[in-house]
Image: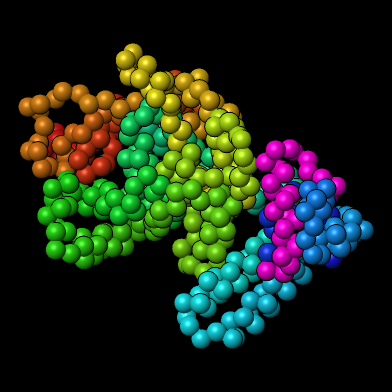
């Protein structure tokens, strides 16, 4: 069974990442390692090419395993699923036996986590086609939409949809992190739950901005309230979130994590938590990795593959994914000098990534001179800048490419729509 699966994996490469390593011998793992090494240089490693490399420096047992794989039968899709299920079961039994021999909780915890992972892991497979007469499926899809209370989007029937990849494009230091924290908080306000990957800053900074936006605190106010303890602000946020039926946000520092590992986390989390993930916000798409890292890839190829896998993540886990693409420094400098808004063609080498994104906004951040018209310096409503969001690619709603809206970025890290003028503003801003 195992050798049949390994032989099949030579043509269906995704199987190599799904076979539980716990049931592989050192020799079998060596063969997979060699396959991955060759895959970095050629699209189609073969058993023969692997054998030629490994047998050139003979190690015990390699020849026998190569022979057994060569004599194995290739499996059809159904047989692959059955074989993987059996191997995962064997791996779980093996880990369970190891746990029974341990006493230290620190040693047991990772093995327990791995058992949960194996129990939930499902190999990639196609869902059954939808019968057009099954209107209930369409109803569920509509219920999965996240309608943000942002007038520009709401008035133009632009929701966030599950199974869809959204992205911002911006210049270097173009305010993407603030923008995505704002978007994540807007999702929380609808009662949906967010997994936020804080890759360019500590997760505490992300949580601070969420607290500031929710409680309308300036930087100085936040520092003053938290100089002795975070308990007060934390309790105030919990009370505010509960009273307004906000969703939960889970913030992780996972720079360099593979997309497949994000997928596994979501599966484990949704199985164990009463707050399933509805949206994933990736602070900077470039800082995650593809599931099967390859050597000698051009940067544009790597980013394209990352966005392809983020799209697949959205589809497979029924979440909306929001991320960003940053322009290179040369493009950023040219756009800043011209004072223009970036578009898809300014993404340069990462243009391939935009093919996998369903909805794209270009970001332009300005710091207008408005001295004398502002609240006091320590006010939560003091203007920090003005964002202009321009639709560059769209598939949903009534907005079209080129449609734009300006937002005022204030000190509590909220964004307030300015065109048309906002409503229900505090007196100090009217």
Residue at image position (49%, 53%) is 278
Quadrant of the rendered image containing residue 380:
top left
Q: Position of residue 24 (x, y in %)?
A: 73, 66
Q: Is residue 168 above or below residue 87?
A: above
Magenta-drawn stretch contains 48: yes
Residue 394 seen in render: no
Tell me: 46 left or right of 406: right
Tell me: 197 left or right of 225: right
Residue at image position (45%, 36%) is 324
Q: Main secondary structure of the magenta part?
A: helix
Image: magenta residue range: 22-49
Quadrant of the image containing the C terminus: top left
**Which residue is most to the front?**
57
Quadrant of the rendered image containing residue 150:
top left
Q: Position of residue 25 (x, y in %)?
A: 74, 67
Residue at image position (62%, 80%) is 98
Observer-nearest of 256 and 364: 256
Residue 86 seen in render: yes
């Amino acid at each position: 069974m195992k050798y049949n699966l390994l032989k099949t994996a030579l043509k269906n490469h995704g199987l190599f990442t799904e076979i539980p390593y716990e049931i592989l011998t050192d020799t079998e793992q060596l063969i997979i390692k060699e396959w991955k090494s060759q895959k970095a240089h050629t699209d189609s490693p073969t058993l023969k090419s692997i054998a030629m490399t490994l047998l050139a420096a003979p190690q015990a047992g390699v020849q026998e395993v190569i022979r057994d794989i060569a004599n194995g039968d290739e499996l059809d899709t159904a047989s692959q699923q059955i074989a993987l299920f059996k191997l995962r079961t064997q791996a779980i039994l093996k880990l369970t036996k190891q746990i029974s021999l341990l006493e230290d909780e620190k040693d047991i915890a990772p093995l327990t986590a791995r058992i949960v992972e194996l129990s939930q892991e499902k190999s990639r497979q196609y869902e059954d086609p939808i019968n057009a007469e099954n209107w209930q499926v369409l109803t569920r899809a509509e219920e999965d939409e996240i309608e943000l209370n942002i007038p520009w989007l709401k008035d133009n029937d632009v929701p966030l949809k599950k199974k869809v990849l959204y992205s911002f494009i911006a210049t270097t230091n173009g305010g993407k992190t603030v923008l995505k924290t704002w978007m994540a908080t807007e999702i929380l306000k609808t009662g949906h739950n967010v997994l936020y990957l804080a890759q360019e800053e500590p997760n505490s900074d992300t949580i601070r901005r969420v607290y500031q936006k929710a409680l309308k605190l300036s930087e100085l106010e936040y520092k003053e309230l938290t100089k002795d303890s975070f308990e007060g602000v934390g309790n105030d946020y919990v009370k505010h979130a509960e009273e307004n039926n906000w969703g939960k946000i889970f913030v992780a520092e996972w720079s360099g994590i593979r997309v497949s590992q994000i997928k596994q986390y979501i599966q484990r989390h949704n199985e164990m938590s009463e707050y399933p993930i509805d949206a994933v916000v990736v602070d900077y798409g470039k800082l995650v990795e593809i599931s099967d890292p390859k050597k000698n890839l051009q940067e544009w190829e790597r980013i394209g593959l990352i966005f392809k896998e983020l799209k697949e993540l959205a589809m497979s886990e029924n979440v909306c994914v929001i991320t960003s693409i940053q322009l290179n420094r040369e493009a950023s400098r040219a756009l800043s000098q011209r004072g223009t808004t970036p578009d898809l063609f300014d993404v340069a080498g990462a243009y391939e990534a935009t093919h996998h994104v369903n909805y794209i906004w270009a970001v332009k951040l300005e710091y207008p001179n408005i001295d004398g018209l502002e609240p006091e310096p320590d006010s939560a409503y003091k203007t920090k800048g003005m964002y202009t969001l321009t639709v560059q690619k769209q598939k949903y709603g009534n907005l079209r490419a080129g449609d734009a809206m300006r937002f005022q970025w204030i000190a509590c890290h909220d964004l307030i729509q300015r065109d048309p003028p906002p409503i229900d503003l505090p007196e100090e801003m009217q």
